[in-house]
């Protein structure tokens, strides 16, 4: 028997509970759709089709085999990676060839934290020697990353609110709050020191009351890894962006390419921390070890597509926001955007931080899917694959990224005979897309502002004699 093609985990004809749940789900969908139709009757058909498609996608994993669910999980992870790279490449026009480095940081962060959790479970909160040092290091890293990120985010939020009050029309605000548009280097270093100091204080308090080991032991390693992996990848993107984002074009691509190779070589040579070429083995799934295999695979599929859906929603909101318009202006012409008041460094850092944070989410989910990760899993090929699906699907287009992931990842997984020639197929498709459809399979739609601008230009040309 072929273990990859097992029987579907759920038999719909013999499951009364599943039938009842399906009927309830259909009733809820129709009720929600009726509410949308009352508000936007002009979009009833498209909204109804989208809602039904989401319902079918949600029920599909229950009727698929384990191998098919595994392929769907891989496609979902690549959709998530593509959406993250689409922010950097599609929205801002920056070429990042080291995107795999942030993917690897998310995966190894989850592997490191889950290994500490297994030591906690086996030692019953009694540690000696190297195990105690490794576990203490892991708990301090978790505390520092979470607390420091919250402090920095809170400080920047307060600064922006104060800046908005300063720029308001109230005379009292202008007189009391004389702040520059962006924090100075001194303020930035002070905020960073405050964040690190607060993290150390919180860690010492937790250790003094004896709550650090207990909290770390009884918290899901997947949730901790997902949170910390996302933050670590985002911070790494900011740290890389600070010195290199003043570069443009080929120079930026070369620097990011080198960074990706440096991270892979570090993971390959730091044997004591990463396992070296032997990698990290036995990474836990999102569910406990006593959960059934069917429940574990279904949970992973739903987590991947839930994460991809949330990332797609955030990407769409960012695209239509003030930040997204700044990215669009910067992509068209950086010099003109800067002359119009767009802070290029801040906009690039924001795009890098968000895009690399999404890569960290994909890395955590990839590690949970594979259970064994190696430095060889994070070669340059991964960056090329993700960049290829973004270009072939359509840069700046969320549906295009999804289509590109299905075409470049899903179909080769189903047709395994062509997997040997994957890089050749990628190159041929890229050349064909540049010639036939340079904007991709599903290019990004023209925004309303661009339509209005073109209409104004057209009217001005018609009015001229």
Image (spheres, helix red, strand yellow):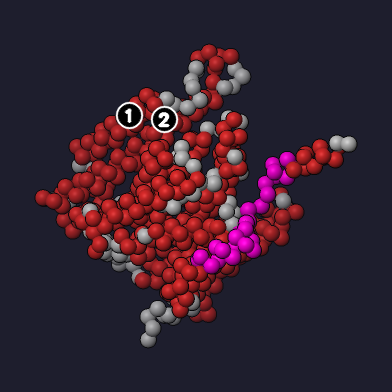
Where, quadrant-wise, is the C terminus in this rendering?
A: top right
What is the quadrant of residue 151 in the picture?
top left
Q: Residue at x 19, y 37 (%)?
A: 208
CB-based contact (under 8 Å), mark 2 and mark 1: yes
What is the quadrant of residue 45 in the picture?
bottom right
Where, quadrant-wise, is the N terminus in this rendering?
A: bottom left
Q: Can residue 226 be seen in this view?
A: no
Q: Name the residue under label 2.
A: 155
Residue 40 is situated, as x and y percent measured from the top left of the image, at: 72, 51
Q: Can residue 432 be seen in this view?
A: yes
**Prevalent SS, magenta region:** helix
Q: What stretch is highlighted in magenta?
A: 426-453
Residue at the limit of the structure toward the left, as seen here: 129
Badge 1, how many Cα within 10 Å: few under 14, some, many 20+?
A: some
Residue nearest the viewer, comparing 288 with 89: 89
Q: Which residue is drawn at 56% across and 61% down?
A: 392
Q: What element carries label 1?
A: helix
Q: Mark 1 points at which residue?
A: 194
What is the quadrant of residue 334 in the picture?
top right
Disc 2 to disc 1, how far (Cα)?
A: 10 Å
Of the image marks 2 and 1, the number of the one nearer the N terminus: 2
């Amino acid at each position: 028997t072929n273990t990859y093609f097992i029987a579907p985990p759920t038999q719909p004809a013999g499951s009364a509970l599943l039938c009842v749940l399906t009927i309830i789900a259909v009733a809820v969908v129709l009720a929600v759709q009726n509410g949308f139709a009352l508000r936007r009757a002009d979009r009833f058909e498209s909204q109804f089709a989208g809602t039904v498609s989401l319902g079918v996608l949600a029920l599909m994993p229950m009727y698929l085999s384990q191998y098919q669910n595994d392929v769907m999980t891989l496609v979902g992870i690549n959709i998530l990676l593509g959406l993250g790279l689409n922010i950097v490449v599609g929205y801002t026009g920056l070429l990042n060839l080291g995107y795999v480095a942030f993917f690897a940081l998310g995966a190894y962060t989850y592997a490191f934290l889950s290994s500490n959790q297994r030591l906690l479970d086996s030692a019953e909160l009694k540690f000696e020697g190297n195990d105690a040092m490794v576990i203490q290091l892991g708990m301090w890293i978790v505390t520092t990353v979470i607390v420091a990120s919250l402090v920095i985010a809170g400080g920047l939020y307060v600064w922006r609110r104060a800046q908005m009050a300063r720029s308001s029309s109230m005379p009292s605000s202008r007189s009391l709050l004389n702040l520059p548009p962006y924090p100075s280097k001194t303020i930035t270093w002070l905020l960073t020191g405050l964040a690190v100091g607060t993290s150390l204080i919180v860690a010492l308090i937790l250790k003094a009351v004896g709550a650090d080991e207990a909290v770390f032991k009884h918290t899901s390693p997947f949730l901790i890894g997902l949170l910390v992996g996302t933050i670590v990848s985002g911070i790494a993107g900011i740290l890389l962006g600070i010195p290199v984002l003043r570069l443009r074009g080929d120079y930026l691509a070369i620097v990011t390419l080198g960074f990706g190779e440096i991270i892979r070589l570090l993971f390959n040579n730091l044997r004591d921390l990463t396992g070296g070429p032997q990698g990290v083995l036995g990474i836990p799934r999102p569910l406990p070890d006593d959960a059934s295999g069917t429940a574990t695979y279904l949970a992973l599929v739903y987590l991947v597509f839930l994460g991809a859906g949330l990332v797609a929603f955030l990407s769409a909101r960012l695209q239509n926001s003030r930040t997204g318009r700044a990215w669009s202006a910067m992509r068209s012409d950086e010099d003109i955007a800067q002359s119009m008041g767009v802070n290029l460094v801040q906009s690039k850092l924001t795009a890098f931080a968000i895009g690399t944070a999404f890569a960290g989410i994909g890395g955590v989910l990839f590690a949970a899917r594979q259970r064994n990760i190696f430095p060889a899993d994070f070669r340059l090929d991964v960056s090329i694959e993700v960049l290829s699906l973004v270009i072939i699907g359509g840069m700046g287009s969320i549906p295009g990224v999804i289509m590109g992931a299905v075409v470049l990842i899903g179909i080769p997984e189903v047709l395994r005979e062509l997997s040997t020639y994957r890089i050749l197929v990628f190159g041929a498709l890229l050349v064909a897309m540049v010639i036939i459809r340079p904007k991709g399979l599903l290019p990004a739609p023209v925004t309303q502002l661009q339509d209005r601008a073109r209409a104004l230009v057209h009217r001005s040309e018609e009015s001229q004699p």
